[in-house]
Image (cartoon, helix red, strand yellow):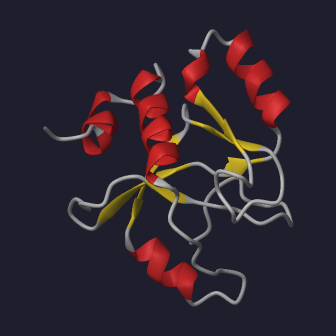
Amino acid sequence: MPLVGLSSAEPHFLIVLNHNHVAGKAILLSIITSQVQKRLAYARSTGKPPATIVQFGPNQYAELDRHSCVDCNSVKLVDASYFSQSASSPHSRPCSDIPAPLLKRIIAGVLASPDVSDNLKALVRPQP
């Protein structure tokens, strides 16, 4: 069950944002990409808030080997079974957790996005 648009030979880092999975679902942010300037230009040209493109590098997430970003305007809801199927793939491997300060920035970007539905935002919104 591949995700649409993940076709390059580069590694794909998928970020699960909610730890309380709802009815067998997991919210999945699109990939971490090294095409930072392309994502920034797209966000500017479409009027997206700057906070929706979260930039970081290997000094903030050691799994990376270059400056990268997450486009928080693209969030997908997938079955949790995707991860068990992916785990059996020879091309998949688990990665270390995103550090809490970076994860907070990514969640803030999702909450700032005009493209993410209120239902998905409710799944990642920090609970008081």
Residue ID at (64%, 51%):
60
**Of the pair 19 and 91, the residue shown nearer to us:** 19
Rendered location of residue 50, percent (x, y)? 61, 18
Rendered location of residue 38, percent (x, y)? 83, 29
In the rendered structure, the answer to whether residue 127 lies left or right of residue 33 reads: left
Residue located farthest toward the front when viewing the structure as drawn:
59
Rendered location of residue 84, percent (x, y)? 45, 82
Residue ID at (43%, 31%):
108
Above/below status of 114 relative to 25: above
Above/below status of 90 relative to 113: below
Rendered location of residue 125, percent (x, y)? 27, 37
**Of the pair 110 and 64, the residue shown nearer to us:** 64
Viewport quadrant of the C terminus: top left
In the rendered structure, the answer to whether residue 40 lies left or right of residue 94 reads: right
**Of the pair 8 and 71, the residue shown nearer to us:** 71
Above/below status of 25 relative to 35: below
Residue ID at (51%, 82%):
85
How many numbered callouts?
Answer: 0
Above/below status of 23 relative to 18: below
